[in-house]
């Protein structure tokens, strides 16, 4: 089904402009979301980290008629300021933000959380994967009018213990809490902040997790729908949250994982169970 996916076209995002952070390649979740938003008429700008990514991502974004690429390592306040200042000069206003960024050292995404986690890497994972949403969201909100919306990407490892996810699970828990506090602060201004808790997807970020394939196959086998999470579903949820359809929804963590998160013990398929 994923191979046949055609992004539903429409006008839901016509007249809206947004920044997408976190496209590394054509498998990135941010790229799936970007294509869906563009198919609904959104005008998009993208951030990238480093020259190599610029070269890889530029052909993708040109394919959907976008041309604005801003360098932005989210751990660098100067680069964040410069990226949003450029957007302000170009567009004046911003309607939405997609934050799809995370990082933890590979050495920590395996084995014992207690043994493998160092102070330096813990703080870096928190900075890139959680605080960066606050840092980017604060700057984005200043360019938004009422009706503005933001989404970030999280994972079940924030709520439950999963093999190898370790430091990243702790960072995702912080990210989900950040989502709620940001929603509280920006709500009175009419701006919404939500998180999508996506099921496992084959991306570069997933490749960095020891045993990531196991998360993928278990995700499929244990999910109540008995299928992989689809990019269609994730992008569709982002479209809903970022468009006016999502009005009144804020501070939520919405699971898009074929129902994996509701399962305590998986069914065996035995008719008598
Ligand atoms: P991805 O394609 O590797 O995207 C991760 C992005 O984060 C990359 O563009 C990466 O850029 C960027 N990034 C890392 N450190 C950065 C920094 N200091 N400054 C700016 N950008 C930085 O993988 P993905 O799976 O689509 O991940 C996107 C989001 O979805 C992440 O938050 C991830 O945790 C979340 N998520 C993924 C899954 C999954 O199964 N794949 C499931 C649930 C949630 P570089 O390549 O330059 O480092």
Image (cartoon, grey):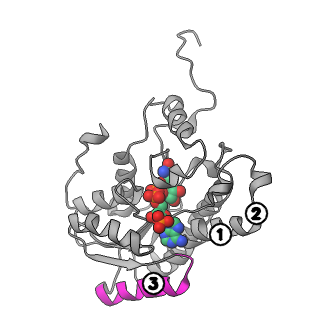
Q: Is label 1 in a helix, a strand or a loop?
A: helix
Local crowd size for mark 1, using a 10 Å CA cut-off: few (<14), some (14–19), many (≥20): some
Task: Estimate the x, y position of residue 30 in percent, counting from the top left.
Answer: 39, 60
User: Residue 110 placed where, x, y %?
Assistant: 67, 48
Residue at 22 percent of width and 51 percent of height: 8
**Residue 250 image position (x, y, % from top left):** 49, 62
Residue stretch in magenta: 74-90
Disc number at residue 142?
A: 3
Q: Residue at x 68, y 52 (%)?
A: 166
Instruction: Find residue 135 and report its image quarter.
Output: bottom right
Name the mark nearer the viewer: 2 or 3: 2
Residue tagged by mark 2?
118
- CB at disc 3 and ligand 1 closer than 8 Å: no
Relative image position of residue 161 (x, y in whole percent): 68, 44
Q: Is residue 195 left or right of residue 89?
A: right
Q: CA distance from mark 1 to mark 2?
A: 10 Å
SS category of the residue bearing label 2: loop
**Residue 225 appears in the rendering:** yes
Circles 2 and 3, Cβ within 8 Å, touching? The answer is: no
The CA distance from mark 3 to mark 1 is 26 Å
Confirm whether the magenta stretch covers residue 86: yes
Crowding near pointer 3: few (<14 within 10 Å), some, many (20+)? few
Which residue occupies 70% across, 64% down? Answer: 122
Query: What is the quadrant of the C terminus in the image?
Result: top right
* Marker disc for residue 124: 1
């Amino acid at each position: 089904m994923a191979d046949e996916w055609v992004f539903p076209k429409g006008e839901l995002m016509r007249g809206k402009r947004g920044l997408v952070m976190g496209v590394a390649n054509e498998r990135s979740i941010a790229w799936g979301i970007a294509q869906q938003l563009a198919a609904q008429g959104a005008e998009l700008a993208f951030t990238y980290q480093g020259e190599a990514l610029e070269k890889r991502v530029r052909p993708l974004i040109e394919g959907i008629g976008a041309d604005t690429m801003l360098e932005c390592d989210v751990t660098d306040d100067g680069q964040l300021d410069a990226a949003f200042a450029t957007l302000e000069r170009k567009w004046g206003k911003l309607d939405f933000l997609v934050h799809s960024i995370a990082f933890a050292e590979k050495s920590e995404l395996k084995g014992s959380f207690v043994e493998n986690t160092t102070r330096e890497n813990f703080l870096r994972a928190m900075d890139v994967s959680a605080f960066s949403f606050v840092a980017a969201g604060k700057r984005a909100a200043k360019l938004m009018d009422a009706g503005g919306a933001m989404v970030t990407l999280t994972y079940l490892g924030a709520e439950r213990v999963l093999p190898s996810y370790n430091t990243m699970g702790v960072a995702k828990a912080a990210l989900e809490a950040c989502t709620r506090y940001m929603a509280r602060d920006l709500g009175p201004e009419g701006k919404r902040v939500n998180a999508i808790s996506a099921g496992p997807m084959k991306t570069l970020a997933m490749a960095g997790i020891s045993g990531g394939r196991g998360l993928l196959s278990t995700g499929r086998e244990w999910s109540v729908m008995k299928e992989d999470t689809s990019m269609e579903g994730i992008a569709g949820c982002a479209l809903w949250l970022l468009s006016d359809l999502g009005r009144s929804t804020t501070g939520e963590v919405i699971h898009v994982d074929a129902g994996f998160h509701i399962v305590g013990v998986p069914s065996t398929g035995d008719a008598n169970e």
